[in-house]
Amino acid sequence: MVMALILGLSSVAFAEGYAEFMATARNSIKAEMYGDALSSAQKALEAKQNGDAEAFLLVGRAYWGLRNYESACKNWENAFRFGIRNPEKYKAEIVNDILATIRATSPDISKAKTFFNYAQGFGCPETTIAKEKIAYGKQKLLAVKNREEAIAFTSFVGQDLIDKAFPPAQIIIVFEKPYTFADAFNEYGQIDTFKFVDDGVNVRDKVEVIAKPIDGGKFSGEEVGIWRGEKFSPPWDMTVKGYYSTIIESAPKGNIFMISLNSRKDLGVTIRVTREVIPSPNRDFLVSIK
């Protein structure tokens, strides 16, 4: 009889303690005193001993306020595992908290992916996830400097948007002209082609030398010699199987890019110079995205 009375009084004390801790935790969360809220919510859990869905929910909210997001989500998962009432209501509230945090903090890519995974795990619709990813990506893209940086956000906004906002490099032809032995100024088949700078060819442009038999056959035999206008001394550069390319590192103004057919009258040689042009970011397009 005495033991039963003691147990009864103990249960009442635990219940009163639990209710007090829960009330304190709720008030602390409202006041954004998340450390105090966590302490009170954890004491409420201890008072219940066997776990409590509402206490887990408050522990999660306290952790979220403290930016311990992983612990927050684990406790929220426990709240649903322990059968919290009105689960859809609380899932919607949690999703709202997660999305609001993404908007407010503009996290790095890794954290953003984690947050979106959390939101998806708590039932956020795919359409909402997609819309929020684009909003996040747009916000980040407004701050990046070039396409190389922008590519990192492809998984959020899609390749089409990246290409419109940060167009890919374009290859333009700076100089292109065909030559034959008839263009040579001596019996060795040496031919002056373009002048650096004067003909628009400059550093970082790409030069290609393409040699093919005039009759359309397969290239064979002695290779074409190439002098890049720097110092006139052998050995010259040579094509390999009739082809040569290089990125110009030095462009001495007025110097001539020369080729030598080595007395071969059977070849046609095309000199092509191309340049990679990076278009400016289309920031007006980013701003217009709704």
Image (cartoon, helix red, strand yellow):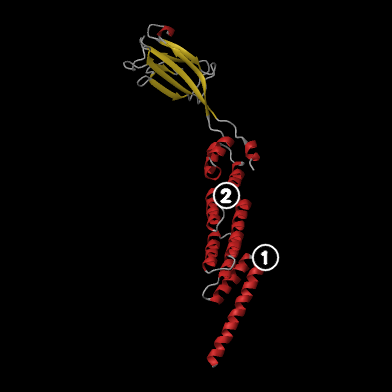
Specify the farthest residue to the right: 31
Can residue 260 be seen at all in this image of the molecule? no
- Where residue 231 sits: x, y (%)? 44, 17
Task: Report the residue marked by disc 1.
Answer: 30
Mark 1 burial class by Cα count in 10 Å: few <14, some 14-19, many 20+: few
Label 1 to label 2: alpha-carbon separation: 31 Å
Q: Image point 54% across, 48% down: which residue? A: 109
Label 1 sits on a secondary structure element that is helix
Residue 34 percent location from the top left of the image: 62, 65
In the displayed orientation, state which residue is furthest to the bottom: 1
Q: Position of residue 153 (x, y in %)?
A: 54, 43
Work out whether 116 lies above or below 228.
below
In screen coordinates, is 197 left or right of 262?
right
Q: Which residue extends farthest left?
A: 221
Q: Tell me the amino acid under the disc marked 2.
A: Thr
**Which corner quadrant of the image does residue 89 belong to?**
bottom right
Asked if 275 appears above or below 33 in the picture, the reply is above
In the picture, the disc for residue 127 is 2
Q: Residue 119 sits in which quadrant? A: bottom right
Query: 103 above or below 208?
Result: below
